[in-house]
Amino acid sequence: MARQPLEHSAAEFIPPDADLTGLQRAARGCRGCPLYQHATQTVFGEGSARARIVLVGETPGDKEDKAGRPFVGPSGRLLDAALEAAGIDRKLAYVTNAVKHFKWEPRGKSRLHKTPNAREIAACRPWLNAELSLLKPQALVLLGATAAKALLGPGFRVSTLRGQVFHGTSLAPLVMATVHPSSVLRAPDDAARHAAQAQFFHDLHALARALAREHLIGKSEGLHAP
C-alpha cells in the first residue's frame, strides 16, 4: 500500500541555501504543523555554526517557549553542569529540539508539557535535518526517548541503550542517546535524583572519552575529557 503524504510539513518553510541565521529567521514563521497555534513562538536551535557536538531534546518547555531559546530552564542548567563535569566546553555544543514548538495542556493556571506525536515529530523533522546538514557534527547526543526514536527509529530503547556510543552512522561519526535532563529533575526523591544525575553525568563522560580517544575533538578546541 502506498504511503500517504504528511498532512503537514515544515519543508515548504525552509529557504534554500540558508545558513543557521537564515534558518532561525525562517522558522519564526513556520506553520508546518498545528502546534504553532498554541505556542508563544518558535524555539529554534542555539549555538555556534562551528559547534562540534549537537544535543537534541524533545520539545521546548514552558520557560523555553516564553524565552524563545532552548534549554534555558532547570533542564538547561543541569545539562550545562553535565557538560562541564565531562570536560566539554559549552561553546562546542549546539542545542536544539526535535520539535520547535511547545506542546502543552492547561492544568489550572499552569501549562503542562505533552509529548509530541509521531506526525508532529515528522512534520518538524526538516528543520532538524537542515540544522544537522549545516553543522555536520562530530557527535550527536539524543536526549530522551522522543529525540532518540525520531532519529534512530521507533524501536530504539533509551532505557537499555543509553550511554552506548555508536560509530559510523549517517548522522555523525559518534552518536549517543541518554535521558533528557528533565527526567532527572522529576525523580521522586533526593536519593533517586542523585543516582539519576550521576548516571546522566556518566553518560556524557563516556561521550567525551570517546571523542578524545578517536581524536575527533582536541583540547585546543575545548575538550578536556578526564
Image: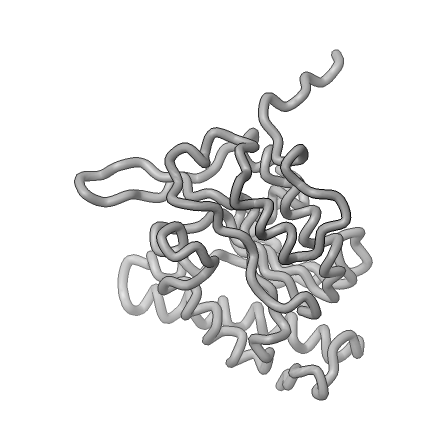
* Residue 116 image point, x, y percent: 48, 37
Tell me where residue 181 sits by quadrant: bottom left
Quadrant for the C terminus in the image: bottom right
Which residue is pictured at 34% across the width and 64% down the height? 192
In the rendered image, the vertical position of residue 83 relative to residue 151, given as above or below: below
Q: Image check: 213 left or right of 195?
A: right
Q: How is the image coloured?
A: one colour
Q: Image check: 72 left or right of 48?
A: left
Q: Residue furthest left?
A: 108
In the rendered image, the vertical position of residue 97 relative to residue 51, given as above or below: above
The answer to whether one can see residue 71 in this image is: yes
Q: Image check: 133 left or right of 72?
A: right
The answer to whether one can see residue 159 in this image is: no
Tell me where residue 163 sits by quadrant: bottom right
* Residue 133 image point, x, y percent: 75, 53
In the rendered image, the vertical position of residue 220 relative to residue 18, given as above or below: below
Which residue is pictured at 61% across the width and 31% down the height? 9
Tell me where residue 184 sits by quadrant: bottom left
Q: Residue furthest top?
A: 1
Quadrant for the N terminus in the image: top right
* Residue 182 image point, x, y percent: 40, 57
Which residue is pictured at 57% across the width and 45% down the height? 27
* Residue 42 image point, x, y percent: 48, 46
Which residue is pictured at 41% across the width and 70% down the height? 77
Marks counted in the figure total 0
Q: Image check: 42 left or right of 67?
A: right
